[in-house]
Amino acid sequence: MTTPSNEPAQPGLLRALGPLMATAIVVGTVIGSGIFKKPQSIAEHVPHFGVVALVWIVGGMLVLLGALAYAEVAVLLPRAGGNYVFLREAYGRLFGFLWGWVEFLIIRSASLAALATIFTESLHDILRNRAFQQAVGLPEHFELGFWTQKILTVLVLLGLALVNVRGVRWGGGVQLLITIVKVGSLLTIFALPFVLLLGAQGSSLRVLPSWENLQPIWPEDWQTIKVAGLGTAFLGVLWAYHGWMNIAPVAEEVRDPQRNLPLALLLGVSLIVFLYLGVNLAYYMVLPGTKMAELKDTTVATAFSLELLGSLGAAAASGAVMCSVFGALNGNLLVGPRLLYAMGEDRLAPHALREIHPSFHTPANAILVLAGWACLLILGTATLTKMGVLDANKSHFDVLTDFAMFGAVIFETMAVTAIFVLRRTMPDAPRPYRCWGYPVVPALYVIVPAFVLGNMFTSQRVEALTGVGFIGLGVISFYLIERG
């Protein structure tokens, strides 16, 4: 006879996410700032449209290959924590901990900080837009001050954190709605040059979209393409695609995960690749690569709309960027805390992080801790800039994303290649979904991340060495925790 425990039963996570919400998490957490901001950096390093398109296509193919393999791992281990669980089961507790260490301190938190920064910068673009100022009666030279922008950035993060504390259905519902809006925004950007070309006769367009803007398509001499520049371009593309794994941390809250996890991954990634290629084609039809490369203080989407539609168009584009970034922020706050929850259950993080809110059935402590650390990164980066420690000419967005990507490339590649280990160590486990093209597909996935990592040690050495340092501190912390 079992003796009843005096301890109250721990509330559990709810399987509240259906296939639409699961796909919205994949799409919504990927489409954030990258497609609006990173084309500038890519154009700066790769001056030929054909090569730019090739970089985006290779990046998309890489993500599709990864999704094919990753879906098998996610279906095999559909538990809260995502990559933490996969790395722990495949490589041991040390690698699971290291993923959690780097994900919390750098990858997820810096991504949240970068996204929130772009949200506030886009709001600032709208508020200082002359057409908007005239429409709402703002003074002509109205602007948000430096610290005002940072405080607003923090408030946006904290507000979304409270929404996700309220319940996974709330967070998932917000994600679905915003994803529909942002997909519609990208489809509008894609279609706009072609619609305007059809109606260009007698129009008063500021700039006429042209296929000539795609020139030069290919380099006359391929030796002029610098390997370092190509690597930096790939890093920008990887940031734009980053987040496609974000369904895995909430796998324990997805209904019928054996069916809905691979469905959400493959449908979501395919849609993203299509949208990104279409939007880049639209950008280049309006903004030649040389002009795009010079954009520093605004997003490519805003400059694109300003060229075509004037100030009101630029304000609308900034609004679309805000909406897109808001959705990516919400998605990251929905999935990121599940890692801390899983680590808390394994006692590799404070045990309080595994506590589920008794009414809302969400890991409330983990949500608030992650949001709080991201807010500290925002304020810390701003303070270091004002002190002159960080380059004032480099945007906070680029500072944060460069640091985030180093650890992401390493450990997310290991999560995909976990399929090799799990096929060997769990050969008899039921696999409702099996990776197509195994073992070639996951092996091909490794090529581009290996190239990008090698390039970072030569062209972005500070970010790479800082990442190595954080990983080294993580190893020390793991053994201290295990011995304690």
Image: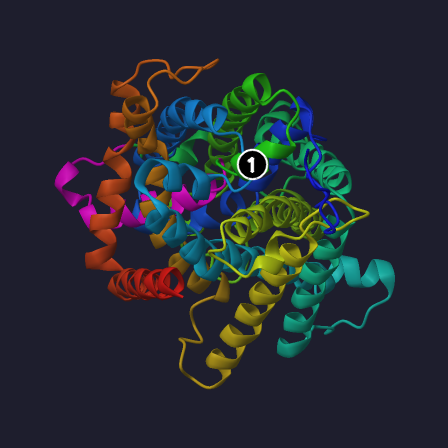
Instruction: Note whether 410 is above or below 297 in the view shown.
Output: above
Instruction: Note whether 235 is above or below 213 in the view shown.
Output: below
Q: Residue 327 location, x and y as percent?
A: 66, 44
Which one is nearer the viewer's eye here, 399 or 430?
430
Q: Is residue 241 visible?
A: yes
Dot 1 amino acid type = Leu
For the stretch drawn in magenta, what is the main secondary structure?
Answer: helix
Q: 275 left or right of 149?
A: left
Task: Please tell me in which quadrant of the rendered image residue 177 appears.
Answer: top right
Q: Secondary structure at mark 1?
A: loop
In the image as oriented, which residue stretches furthest toward the bottom? Answer: 387
Q: 40 left or right of 311?
A: left
Q: Residues within 10 Å of mark 1 (few under 14, many from 20)?
A: some
**What is the magenta range?**
218-244
Q: Residue at x 61, y 52 (%)?
A: 354
Q: Is residue 290 visible?
A: no
> Looking at the rendering, in which quadrant would you find the C terminus?
bottom left
Q: Residue 199 location, x and y as percent?
A: 66, 25
Which one is nearer the viewer's eye here, 425 or 378?
425
Which one is nearer the viewer's eye here, 322 or 464?
464
Q: 154 left or right of 69?
A: right
Q: Residue 127 location, x and y as percent?
A: 73, 63
Q: Is 256 included in the stretch rendered in magenta? A: no
Q: Is 241 included in the stretch rendered in magenta? A: yes
Residue at image mark 1:
208
Q: Residue 261 location, x and y as percent?
A: 55, 24
> Looking at the rendering, in which quadrant would you find the N terminus?
top right
Instruction: Note whether 266 is above or below 279 in the view shown.
Output: above
